[in-house]
Structures are given as C-alpha cells and as structure tokens.
Image (tube, coloured by chain):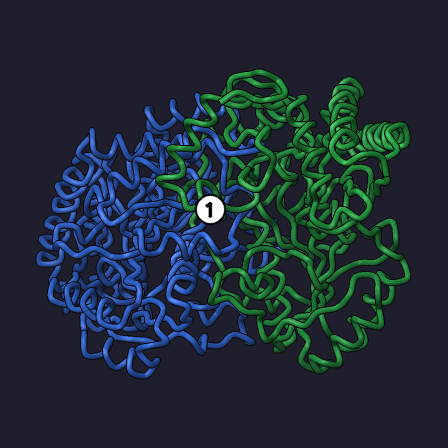
Chain colours: A blue, B green
Amino acid sequence: MTDALTAVSRDQDQSLRERADKVIPGGMYGHLSAQRLPAHYPQFYARVQGARAWDVDGREFVDMMCSFGPMILGYQHEKVEQAAAAQRESGDTQPGPGACMVELAELLTERVDHADWAMFGKNGSDATRLCLSAARATTGRRSVVAAETSYHGWSSWSNKLADGSAGRPDPETFRYTYNDLDSVRAAVAQACPEKVAAIFVSPFRHDAGHDQELIDPEFAKGIRALCDEIGAALAMDEVRAGFRLHHGSSWEPLGVKPDLSAWSKAIANGYPLAAALGNERFRAGIEQVFATGSFWYQAVPMAAAVATIHALKDEDAVAKMQATGTRLREGIAQQADQYSCDINQSGPVQIPNLSFAGDVEFKKAMTFCGAAAANGAILHPRHNWFLSSAHTDADIDRVLEATDAAFRAVRATFGPD
Amino acid sequence: MTDALTAVSRDQDQSLRERADKVIPGGMYGHLSAQRLPAHYPQFYARVQGARAWDVDGREFVDMMCSFGPMILGYQHEKVEQAAAAQRESGDTQPGPGACMVELAELLTERVDHADWAMFGKNGSDATRLCLSAARATTGRRSVVAAETSYHGWSSWSNKLADGSAGRPDPETFRYTYNDLDSVRAAVAQACPEKVAAIFVSPFRHDAGHDQELIDPEFAKGIRALCDEIGAALAMDEVRAGFRLHHGSSWEPLGVKPDLSAWSKAIANGYPLAAALGNERFRAGIEQVFATGSFWYQAVPMAAAVATIHALKDEDAVAKMQATGTRLREGIAQQADQYSCDINQSGPVQIPNLSFAGDVEFKKAMTFCGAAAANGAILHPRHNWFLSSAHTDADIDRVLEATDAAFRAVRATFGPD
C-alpha cells in the first residue's frame, strides 16, 4: 500500500493491520483506533522524540495529539526519564510503595489548592470513579449530576456504551447543559437535591465531536454555590485539561475550588498514573472505600510524576503552550481566511479544536486531517488536539505547512464556502 | 522506633508513615497498606532484586508476596528488563500502539487455548469488566453470577464496598458457593436463566480470609455445561492465578475452556498491564463496546509481557514454582508438627495459604507473620502468598528459618494446640 499523497510505502503499517485484524477486536479498539480516520493516518508507531513521532514505515510527523494528552513536556524528556530511570534501578512494582508516593502526594496537595489528600490509580476512569466513591461515602447519597455528552471515563456510571448493545444510561446519573446553571438546577431537582452525592464538571467543555466552550466564571461560581446549598461534592474532572491551563487546579484563576478532582493523562508525561485529590471533608469517607489495583503503587510513574510537575513549573510550560498554541491558532485563522473556509477554532489555545461550518458529518474535517497526516502532522477531525511545551515555533510552522496543504485539499474537494 | 525483635532502627519507615498520614487517606489504602499488619512489617520499600526486597531502613526480606502477584520471574529479570529498555528507547506511550501490541495479542491467543482475540487495559478490574462487557454486549443480557466472597476487582458490579457507607451489592449480581454446582443452578434460577450474561469463576477458590479450595474437575465441567445450556458466557478470572498454574489457561489440564478470561498481575512481571481474552462468539459483541484508557496502548509493558511469557516457558517456571512451593509446604508442615501447631495449608503450592485451626480472628496468623517479618520473610496472615521462579531453595530455606521463629512465637504466645 502506497500513500496516495506522499508516495511513501505503507507496507509495515498495512501488514500489522492485517495481523491485528485477526487477534484484536475490530483490528483496534478505543480512542487510538485509526479505523475511523482517513487512510493517511498510521495505526502503528515505531518511535517518538520531543514533539515528533515516526510510524512503523518511517514516516515522520509533528504530533499535535500528544498521545491524546499524556505527553506534555515532550517525548523522552530528559529530566523525567532520569528520574524514572533512577527509581527503576531500585524498584518499580514492589511489595509496598516507595518514598516517592509520599513525595508525590505532598507535591500534589501543595500544588493544587483545594487538595488535602491524594490517592493513586492507573486510568483517568479510576480517578473519576474514586471521586464518585469519595462523594458517595461521605454524603451517604448515590446520585450524580454530569454534563450531557461529557466524557468522564469508560465506567458505566458515565458511559452508556460500556456494555455495547446491553448498555444503558445509569439510572443514578442525571444530565445538565454545560455553562447553563438553570439546567444544573433542573437536573438536581430531577435527581432530588438530598440524593445528589456529586456534581461533576470539566474545567471547560471539551466533548468529542462538539465545538469547545470556555468556562463562564459565573457558571463556575454558581455550580460551587449550588453544591454548598445541597451538600453535594463539586468534583472536577481534570483528566483531559490538568496542568495544561494552570500549574494547579484549572479554576484557581477564577477563585473557585472543587472538593474533589480527578487527574491522569499528563501528570507523569506519559507514564501510567491517575490521581484523585480531595479536601478534608471527604477524607473520612474515602477511608471507608475499598479501592485498589495491582499496579496502583508502582514507583516509576510516581517518580516520573514528581519530575514532570517540577519541570512544568521550572520550564514555564503553560506559558510556552499558550505561546505556541496562539501561533497555531493565528496561523490557521489566516489560512482559513486565505482559502475562504468558514471554520471555528474553540477552547484554550493549549487544547485547540477545529471545526468547519455546517460540517455535521465531519467530511471536511476528515479531508483536512487526512491531508495534514499525509503532509506530516497528526491532528484529529472530531477530538481536540494538545500542545506540549516541546512544540517549538519550528514545529508549529511545520504543522502550518501541513494545514496549508489541508486547506487546499478541502477547497479542492468542497469548493469555497 | 526500633523493631522489638531485631533491634534494627525503623526511623525511615516511621517518618514516611507520619508524612503519609497527612496526605494519603488512612496513611495508605488498599491491599498494600501495612496498617492492619503487625508492626514488624515495613510500609515503604527502597529496593527489590530477584526474590528479595529491602525496606527504606535497609532491612532485607525474602518476598513471599511477589508484590501480591505481579512478580513471577524475579524482580529486575534480565530478559524482561532488556525487552522493556529496548522498547522504551523507541517509545512507550505513543500516538498509537507499537508493533509489540500485535505480537503480544498473537502470543496470548496462541498460548491460551480458548482465546481468539485480546484487548488490553491496566488493572485486573479493567480485564474483568471487559469480560463482563463482552458477555453483556454479546448476549444482550445484564445479570452476572459469581462466587460469594470472591474478588473480581474493585468495580461496583463485584465489590459492594466500592462506595463505602453508600455502597451496596449490585442488584444484577447473584452469588453461588465455589465447587457447589447446585448453588450455581440456584443462583441462575434466582437471576432467571435467560437474563444471565456471564458466570464468573476463579481457577481455584482463593478468597482472602478463607482457606483455599482446589477446583473440583466435575464442578468445572458442570459450570461449563450450565453456561452452554443457558447461553451465558463462562468468564474465568485469571488475574490472581494466571501463568502460575499452567503456561496457558488454568483449566486446560482439565480440558475445560472458558469463553472469556481476565489476566493481569503476573503477565508482564510487574509492568502494569491487563488483558481480556475471548473466543470468536464474543468478538462481534466486544467490538460494539466503548472501552478505552489513556495508557492502554503503552508499549513498554507489552514488550515486557512478550518477554515474560516467553521466559516463563523457556525457564520452565511453573515446574520451578511447584518444586520450591512444595519445599516450602513440606518445611512448614514439619515445623507445625514439631511445634504442635494445628495448621491448614491450602491451595496450589505455587499460591500457598496458611491458616491456624480455630484462628477466626487471625490472632495466631498475625503473630506468626509478624515474627516472620521480623525475621526476614514477607508473608501475609489473611491473603495467599505467591511463589516466583526466582525463589531458590536457599530463599525457601531462609523463609523456613523465619517461619521456625514464627512458630516459636505462636507457641510462646498461645501455647500448644
């Protein structure tokens, strides 16, 4: 198989896809499946370094997905890898935690202003589920209120597709519209205020397949006040956004503190780790909960997380991502204008999203991202992208060459807007 | 703080416990908490190598818990670490899976006779939940039948303590007694046969706080026949036992094949990985399920798993664990006899369990294991232990020195039986 646009052999990727079809359901599952992406996307990767990735056929890409978030300082970041290697030499999965677990819990509770304690898991879903457990155990209530079309992990409380055709919405989960406080009040009323254990919220609206929405500060304050009024926990899902918007909890600049927060993805720059953080009110409750995992105490990801969190601040990572994210946003806006494409760029520049006006079936987005992939940039047609502090201006300019070709492809296929 | 029996300083461990009390709920949570263990147990570890572990105060132990199972070839196993290091140099968490994911899925489906496909996660709970999802999506049914007091992960379908005081048994989960086919029939009748998606079973009964029970081959055949009769999946939880009893699925020697199986713990010798395996009947169902995790595609644990699974066979690990496990069982039996202690050793010798007659509050077991820890062996009073292929006869003899002291302590505290 040869890439139509780049005339590069795709034999290795194709051969692995054929082998995978036999032994992996659907050939690949979950968010890293390339099945629903244009053919120019690789499925299998051979190497990563900094902000670049190489597929199994040796094609080089600027990675604007950062492995869907985990990479925040760049792949193979020297200080993170040194800390990980030093811990690995002593021990990784051991008969008990290492000192680095205490160090990490201290660092997180110091860095995140609402947090008095930390518990660790492996998946973002572990962290959101721990927050729910803490809320339920503390309040003695069971219901959850969460935004419609929001994603809080694959657990059945939030994901009605967890059981495929036998799946169903959880009867204890009630839905509101992001940034619409009246809809939260309505969901709470439907659930019965005295039965609501927690209201879940994301730092901004970042639902896949939708334009993003920044948080309305009045909504943030209102949802906090509502939780206080009904005695429910405000649980913030920082899995996607954590440490990309702020060096602490994402709503700290608004002066709004959640009670509980769920973290994963970027906190250890790619090492598998999740954390649930909480304040004093929820400590006694979470202590009653039985939750554990075989690898929840693994030392290397914790040592990597300590190094990551320090490096983020030392390197002023948020400011860097804002600068390069702005360069990307402005560059794309200029190209869209030049090619007369009606687009919408939404969300924080560090976690950008691009959509085409009226493109409800994502046909333009697919053409755009397919051409970008064929020209060396990994973007996504239905999901936000991620900046890292390893993305340089040169990387962004390389991406802008790819998006220029991508706009040309959209224009050639669909004509001007 | 000084260890009463060994006169060794425990200052580092104590100091870390005091720091942990402030920032970690209960000072530590889950199965690696030393809070409910005798004071001689360390909470924090500094180093592991082969079958040995050192705590933060430099005390050396023979580790008979193998980190509660993950370590099966010995800590820092050369071939596994080489494979992991080689993969790490290229990439670990990447924008997509590496070729090693396909290689691992091929190896697992070749090694485990019932398996036609593999999906990967991070926790044993991910793997059991994926099996449940596959069963529900395929059958269009929702109910689960599982053994009473069995542990299939911390997910709420199997763990009523997942929400602490607000927790409750899942209304779709029905319970049977291990090795009692009539009780399975009764649970199925209670659930309604046409509503049962899956019957979960462990390769042998290994519930914490209970003596273990080997599988009755007639029970295994009967539960298989019952699943066929009612159209439910037979889902085998291999998370604890997998690859310690057999180089394939644990019931292969009985000629009984499950439809689905859940694996984790030992499959990558300590690297964080879980796998759900299934046969063709369940492939189309699992393809409809939305399940994913940020780190489910991480390449290093998959490369480590490939090396682990090959090394297990190349080193004849099961036979080695059987030999050293037998040495341990016989040595302990002899000591119990010598000290007139009425004990029960149960389960496979590779996954041993020790209990004292009439010791319902585990007081003798606590004294025993506390003295063993003070004398350099990590055992557990309420949970099975684990052998690894790295345990040598000399390691076992070192453990038997510790258990000799431990029997003396039990005898001194409680008198002869």
- Identify the residue at horizontal 43%, vertical 59% (top origin): A129
Query: What residue does disc 1 label?
Result: A122
Is residue A2 visible to us here?
Answer: no
- Identify the residue at horizontal 16%, vertical 37% (top origin): A320
- Identify the residue at horizontal 32%, vertical 63% (top origin): A208
Mark count: 1
Tell me where residue B291 appears, x and y as whole percent: 49, 60
Query: Does A96 sit left or right of B197 as displayed?
Result: left
Residue A82 lies in quadrant: top left
Q: Work out which quarter of the rendered image holds the C terminus of chain B and state it.
A: top right
Q: Nearer the viewer, residue B155 or A404?
A: B155
Q: Amino acid at mark 1?
A: Lys
Q: Secondary structure at mark 1?
A: loop
Residue A260 lies in quadrant: bottom left
Is residue B309 visible to us here?
Answer: yes
Neighbour tally class for label 1: few under 14, some 14-19, many 20 plus, Cα within 10 Å: many
Q: Nearer the viewer, residue B375 or B255?
A: B375
- Identify the residue at horizontal 69%, vertical 79% (top origin): B191
Tell me where residue A278 appears, x and y as whole percent: 32, 51
Query: Does A358 sit left or right of B376 as displayed?
Result: left
Vertical position of residue A175 compared to residue B207: above or below: below
